[in-house]
Image (tube, coloured by chain):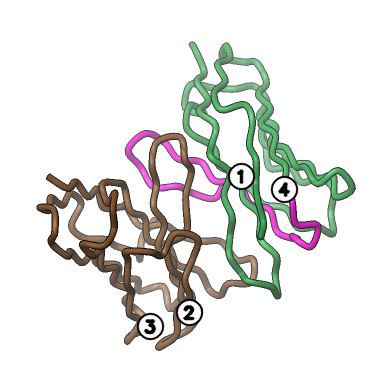
């Protein structure tokens, strides 16, 4: 479990506000990922990054943005353009994208009031 | 793109019984198939994975089988215990392709003492 952290654990936001979720890892992993988890929907990929200063859209990128300025960090911003942002957000990392185990953070539960 | 279907969505068994979770995938080029377990309120964790060059892999009470022709893979849990109660996710990835892990929607397993 160790080595990948997310903060905060719970986050409340008013409609129309942007919010940034933190994800940090000290596993020296090249690849990092953001997933959204909704009941009965499994894990859906928002964005992923295989190397510093590069990232790609996943399956549900609309309304989200990311940056990868450091190997250890991959913050996710949920913008006001995201129509239904209330969800559980999971960050993960792996040695590389090539079929290596993804290690997940503890998650952030975002609620829009 | 890849599509992973998982069934059943819920399964309830008695302690000591076996449980089988089945997944199908659509991209015949997918070659890495991990299984993740997520206990209530916790992060997903890898429990076993299989690559397309083998048909079966075992680790104590759990085993995974892969049928490339039919494009399906299954997780088998024998001698189930209450601590096996969790949500199980299958996933598929094509190494050398998009490098995106595509998850099924998950199956909630309940083991009754």
| Same chain, labels 1 and 2 | no
Rendering coords of residue A94 (x, y %): 50, 69
Q: Nearer the viewer, residue A95 or B97?
A: B97
Q: Are marks 2 and 4 on the same chain?
A: no
Residue A40 bears which disc, if any?
none
Helix, strand, or loop for circle 3?
loop
Decide which of A9, A27 is in the foreground and name it: A9
In the rendered structure, are the residues bearing label 3 and label 2 in contact, judged by CB atoms less than 8 Å apart?
Answer: yes
In the rendered structure, the answer to whether residue A61 lies left or right of residue A97 reads: left
x 56%, y 75%: residue: A96
Q: What subunit carries mark 4?
A: B
Q: Is residue B67 shown left or right of residue B30? A: right
Question: Would you say the residues marked 4 and 1 are in contact, meaning their CB atoms lie under 8 Å apart?
Answer: no
Residue that carries the numbered disc 3 in the rendered image: A71
Where does label 2 land, which residue?
A30
Q: Which hue belongs to chain A?
A: brown
Question: Pointer 4: what residue?
Answer: B25
Q: How would you rate the neighbour count of disc 3 (Cα within 10 Å): few for under 14, some for 14-19, many for 20 or more?
A: many
Q: Residues within 10 Å of mark 2 (few under 14, many from 20)?
A: some
Specify the subunit that label 1 lies on: B
Residue sitting at 10 percent across and 52 percent down? A14
Q: Front-most of B57 and B34?
A: B34
Secondary structure at badge 1 equals strand
Chain letter belonging to callout 3? A
Q: CA distance from mark 3 to mark 2?
A: 7 Å
How far apart are labels 4 and 3 at the CA level? 32 Å
In percent of width and height, residue A58 lies at: 49, 65
Q: Colour of chain B?
A: green
């Amino acid at each position: 479990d160790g080595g990948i952290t997310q903060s905060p654990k719970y986050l409340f936001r008013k409609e129309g506000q942007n919010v940034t979720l933190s994800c940090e890892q000290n596993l020296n992993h090249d690849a990092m990922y953001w997933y959204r988890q909704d009941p009965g929907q499994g894990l859906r990929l928002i964005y992923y990054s295989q190397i510093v200063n590069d990232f790609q859209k996943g399956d549900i990128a609309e309304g989200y943005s990311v940056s990868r300025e450091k190997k250890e960090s991959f913050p996710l911003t949920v913008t006001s353009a995201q129509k239904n942002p209330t969800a559980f957000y999971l960050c993960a990392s792996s040695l590389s994208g090539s079929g290596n185990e993804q290690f997940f953070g503890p998650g952030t539960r975002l609620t829009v009031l | 793109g890849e599509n992973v279907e998982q069934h059943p969505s819920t399964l309830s068994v008695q302690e000591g019984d076996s449980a089988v979770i089945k997944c199908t995938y659509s991209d015949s080029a997918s070659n890495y198939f991990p299984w993740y377990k997520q206990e209530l309120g916790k992060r997903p964790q890898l429990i076993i994975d299989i690559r397309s060059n083998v048909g079966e892999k075992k680790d104590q009470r759990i085993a995974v089988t892969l049928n490339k022709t039919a494009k399906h893979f299954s997780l088998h849990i024998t001698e189930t215990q209450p601590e096996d109660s969790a949500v199980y996710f299958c996933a598929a990835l094509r190494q050398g392709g998009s490098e995106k892990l595509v998850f099924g929607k998950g199956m909630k397993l309940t083991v009754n003492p």
